[in-house]
Image: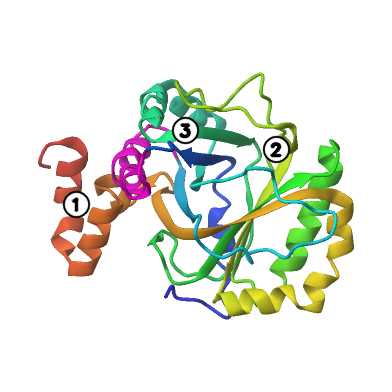
Amino acid sequence: MSEVSITTDYADRDASIAINSYTTVLRRPRVPHEVFATYWRDVHGPLCARIPGLGWYVQNHLNREQDAHLWPAIDGIAPFVEYELDGGVEIGFASQADQDVFNAASHILFADEQNMFAATVAYALPTGSRTLVDRLADPIPNGDDGLDRLHIHFGARGDDAAAFGEFMTGFAETLAADPAVLKLRLHLPDSYDNANPAPPAPNVDHLVPAERTLIAVIELAFEMPLTRRAFFDSETFRATQEGQKRHIAYASAFAVSGVYTYVRNKQLTTAGLRGSRPAQLIERLGANNQLASEVRQLMQEGKMP
C-alpha cells in the first residue's frame, strides 16, 4: 500500500510540467494483454524515456476486467459508445523549447507504436494539467500500490469549451476538497482535431468520433473501493449531479491496474533507465549497487565513468 499523508499535500510537485499531453491507448486485438503490458512497460517505456527534452512520462495501465460500478450512473449522461482502453499516458515538458526538442526526435518512438497499439489519441494540454490534491508520498510509483485508482473520461454537452472547462474545474475542486479523495488530477485538453491526427504514428488509428473531440479526464485515488462507493453516496457528490447533467453528455470510467513513472523533473527513474520490471526486481532485492552512479552511467552511456 502506498504511504498516505493525512496532513501533507504533494500537489505542488507537479507544477513544473508546463505543457502536457494525455494519450489514450488501445492494444492491437491479437496481441495478448500480458505481452502488450510487458512490451509497453519494458520495451516501449524505456525507449520513450530516453527521447531528449522529456520532462514527465507516466504510463497508467487500465484494467478492463474490474467491475462496472466505478462511476455512478446519472440520468441523461451516457457512457461513450464502444469505448475500450488499455491505458492513458502523460507526456509532459517544462518548456516549449523542450517539447520542440522531443518532437524533432519522436519519430523513433512513434515508429514503435504499431507493434502493440491499434489506436492512440494524443490530447494536447498546452497549458499543462492540474493536480488539485495529492496525499500520496511516492512521487515515482512503479506498479500497483494497492489503492483504488480510476480515470474518468467526460464528454461535453455541446461545443462550448470555455463553459465546459469552467464547470469541470469547479466540479474537480469540489471533489478534491473531500478528505476521502487522496488524489485528483484534472486534464482539460484542447478540442481534438481529426484533420490533424496525433500522435503521427504510422499504421495506428488516431481518429475519434464527434463525442470524444471535447473531453475532460479526472484521475482519482481512494483508499479502497468501499471508500469510493461511500463517497458517491455522500451529499457532497450528490449535490454535483444537476450540474453534471447540464454540462456532461458522456462519462466512462476506467480502473487503473498500475502506474509506472519513467521520467520526473527531466530525470530518468530506475524504471526509465532499466525497464519497469527490472526496477521492481532491484527494489525487491534491495540491490543498492544497481543504483550507484557508475552503474547508472554505464547503463545510460555504455561506458564507465
Q: Position of residue 116 (x, y in %)?
A: 38, 35
In which quadrant of the rendered view does residue 190 lie?
top right
Q: Is residue 176 left or right of residue 2?
A: right
Q: Which residues are magenta?
A: 31-54
Choose between 296 and 87: the one closer to the eye: 87
Q: Residues within 10 Å of mark 2 (few under 14, many from 20)?
A: some
In which quadrant of the rendered view does residue 163 lie?
top right
Judge whether residue 93 can be spotted in this image. no
Going by the numbered disc 3, the residue's amino acid type is Ala
Choose between 175 and 227: the one closer to the eye: 227
Is residue 138 positioned above or below 267 on the image? below
Q: Nearer the viewer, mark 2 or mark 1?
A: 2
* The magenta stretch spans residue 45: yes
- The residue labelled by disc 3 is 118
Residue at image point 18% right, 43% down: 299
Going by the numbered disc 1, the residue's amino acid type is Ser
Disc with the residue nearer the chain's start (1 vs 3): 3
Dots 1, 3 in contact, CB < 8 A: no
Residue at image point 52% right, 34% down: 120
- The residue labelled by disc 1 is 293
Q: Nearer the viewer, mark 3 or mark 2?
A: 3
In which quadrant of the rendered view does residue 172 lie?
bottom right
**Disc ID at residue 14:** none
- The residue labelled by disc 2 is 212
Judged from this view, the residue extending furthest toward the left is: 304
Residue at image point 45% right, 22% down: 203
Q: How many marks?
A: 3
**What SS does tag 3 mark?**
strand
* The magenta stretch spans residue 50: yes
Is residue 37 positioned above or below 289 on the image? above
Q: Residues within 10 Å of mark 1 (few under 14, many from 20)?
A: few
